[in-house]
Image: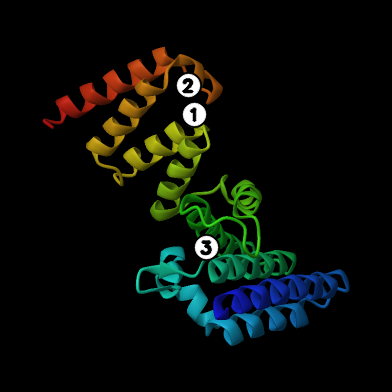
């Protein structure tokens, strides 16, 4: 009963808050909108602007996890508030701060999607797709790239998954075995599913062989 009441209160509060924030933005009252976002983050999650700037997306996930159970309603709520906060900062001309906030919001929504939380406060899949379009042109942190890799693969966006895989390899953030396992999974899908995801069995075989050759040259 307590959990249900908590969820219903959170859903209602976030819906009402987003409406208020959007109304303030439409009236060009961005300072008041930021104050409202910060008030909600502090009141519900004990997170102020300084703390949020110091935390990574995964840090926030850890803070919202107790005894192995993650509060996905909290994650989705924080992500929505970060999304709104980012939009306000962008309107104020601070694109760098907006980008950082969107990266964290996307991280939280991807964790919700990949962990199968379902829609609680917001649809994490829909939110993730919107945030992805805003941050994907820029260099992303390794932790977010790994989540994107899993999300793309799970969603059948196989060419996008392979692109992220190679970025991680080039950055030295992915072990050979992890990349090898990716191509093993791709080979098991069959050409029809590969083509639907933007790849072909020929491309997969060639990339797998090239990967093996490169690692052999390095003495792996």
- Residue pictured at 34% horizontal, 32% vertical: 182
Residue 125 drawn at (x, y percent): 60, 49
- Residue pictured at 80% horizontal, 69% vertical: 22
Rendered view: 4 above or below 96:
below
Could you tell which of marks 2 and 1 lies nearer the N-terminus?
1
Rendered view: 213 above or below 85:
above
Residue corresponding to mark 1: 159
| Separation of marks 2 and 3 at Cα, in angstroms | 31 Å
Q: Residue furthest left?
A: 219
| Separation of marks 1 and 3 at Cα, in angstroms | 24 Å
Residue 41 drawn at (x, y percent): 60, 80
Q: Quadrant of the C terminus?
A: top left
The kind of secondary structure element at disc 1 is: helix
Residue corresponding to mark 3: 104
Circle 1 crowding by C-alpha within 10 Å: few under 14, some 14–19, many from 20: some
Residue corresponding to mark 2: 194
- Which image quadrant for residue 95? bottom right
Whether residue 4 sits left or right of residue 217 in the image: it is: right
Nearer the observer, 73 or 23:
73
Colour scheme of the rendered structure? rainbow
Rendered view: 131 above or below 83:
above
- Which image quadrant for residue 49? bottom right
Contact between labelled residues 1 and 2, with CB atoms less than 8 Å apart: no
Q: How many marks?
A: 3
């Amino acid at each position: 009963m307590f959990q249900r009441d908590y969820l219903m209160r959170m859903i209602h509060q976030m819906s009402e808050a987003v409406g208020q924030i959007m109304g303030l933005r439409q009236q060009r009252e961005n300072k008041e909108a930021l104050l409202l976002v910060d008030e909600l983050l502090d009141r519900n999650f004990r997170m102020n602007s300084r703390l949020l700037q110091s935390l990574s997306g995964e840090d926030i996930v850890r803070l919202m996890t107790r005894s192995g159970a993650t509060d996905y309603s909290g994650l989705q709520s924080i992500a929505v508030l970060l999304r709104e906060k980012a939009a306000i900062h962008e309107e104020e001309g601070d694109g760098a701060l907006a980008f950082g906030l969107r990266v964290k919001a996307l991280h939280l929504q991807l964790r919700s999607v990949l962990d199968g939380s379902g829609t609680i406060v917001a649809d994490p899949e829909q939110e993730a797709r919107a945030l992805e379009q805003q941050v994907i042109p820029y260099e992303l942190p390794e932790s977010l790239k790994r989540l994107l890799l899993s999300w793309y693969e799970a969603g059948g966006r196989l060419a996008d998954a392979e692109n992220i895989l190679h970025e991680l390899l080039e950055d030295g953030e992915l072990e050979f075995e992890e990349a090898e396992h990716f191509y093993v999974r791709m080979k098991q899908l069959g050409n029809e599913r590969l083509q639907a995801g933007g790849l072909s069995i020929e491309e997969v075989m060639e990339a797998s062989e090239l990967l093996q050759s490169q690692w052999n040259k390095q003495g792996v």
